[in-house]
Image (cartoon, grey):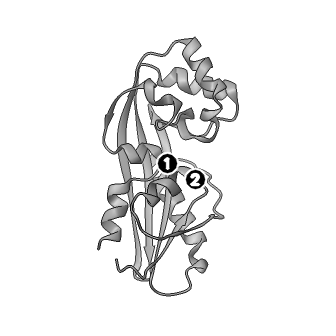
Amino acid sequence: MPENFDIILASRSPRRRDLLGLLGRTFRIVEPTHAEQRLPGEHAADYAVRNAREKARSVRHHAGTTNFLIIGADTIVVLDERILEKPRDAAHARAMLRALSDRTHEVITGLALLTAAGEKCSAVRTAVTFRALSDAEIETYITTGEPFDKAGAYGIQGHAAHLVTEIRGSYTNVVGLPLAEVAEALNH
């Protein structure tokens, strides 16, 4: 993608902003207006992709030229076919972390790349395994405040780094933006 493209990140996430900044391209952030709500019977990956697409579409009017790339993303945690979104409160975070303890789950980021020529959407998947967590470790992690704005009630890039024993797939996907896929789009 030429340097003169207007790159817009449709996100409220400081983690996505920081990750995109690692690619060394100038971009701007426009907060999306799409409200995330799962449709009845919607599969997890379809839900994440639809949210990413709608976030990107909701900021389309901010792209003033035909030379633009809008990036929308939505990250969810899936355990046993159940979507673990951001916890409502400490009890909800505690229940999520107990469920993830000593288990492997999937992190899915729906990624939407919009240009004047059209849209390219995909679901990027990463398997993450937690070690067995004690109740005391869960309580200590909750007191950091970190679980409350993150899908699955954890942030792998923060205090929860020591909870994870294995990752199969993209680390940046777990943080919230699969950089390899975004870099590929920017380089073509």
- Report whether 167 appears left or right of 175: left
Where 68 falls versus 16 (above or below)? below
- Report whether 40 appears left or right of 117: right
Residue drawn at point x = 66 percent, y = 64 percent: 33
Q: Secondary structure at mark 2?
A: loop
Specify the amino acid type for callout 2.
Ser
Where 88 falls versus 137 (above or below)? below
> Which tag, 1 or 2, sits closer to the chain's start?
2
Query: Residue 39, can we see it?
Result: no
In the image shown, does 149 or 92 lie closer to the viewer? 149
**Label 2, on which residue?**
13
The crowd level at tag 2 (other Cα within 10 Å; few <14, some 14-19, many 20+) is some
Q: Residue most toward the bottom?
A: 65
Residue 67 in the image, given as x and y percentages of width and height: 44, 84
Query: Residue 152, can we see it?
Result: yes
Location of the C terminus (image quadrant): bottom left
Rounded to the nearest whole Å, what is the CA distance between mark 1 and mark 2? 11 Å
Find residue 75 and name its label.
1
Residue drawn at point x = 58 percent, y = 50 percent: 38
Residue 165 in the image, given as x and y percentages of width and height: 36, 25
Residue 180 in the image, given as x and y percentages of width and height: 32, 56
Specify the amino acid type for callout 1.
Thr
Where 108 falls versus 186 (above or below)? above
Residue drawn at point x = 61 percent, y = 57 percent: 12
In the image shown, does 74 or 147 lie closer to the viewer? 147
- Report whether 55 appears left or right of 168: right
Where 27 falls versus 173 (above or below)? below
In the image shown, does 23 or 52 lie closer to the viewer? 23
Residue 83 in the image, given as x and y percentages of width and height: 52, 39
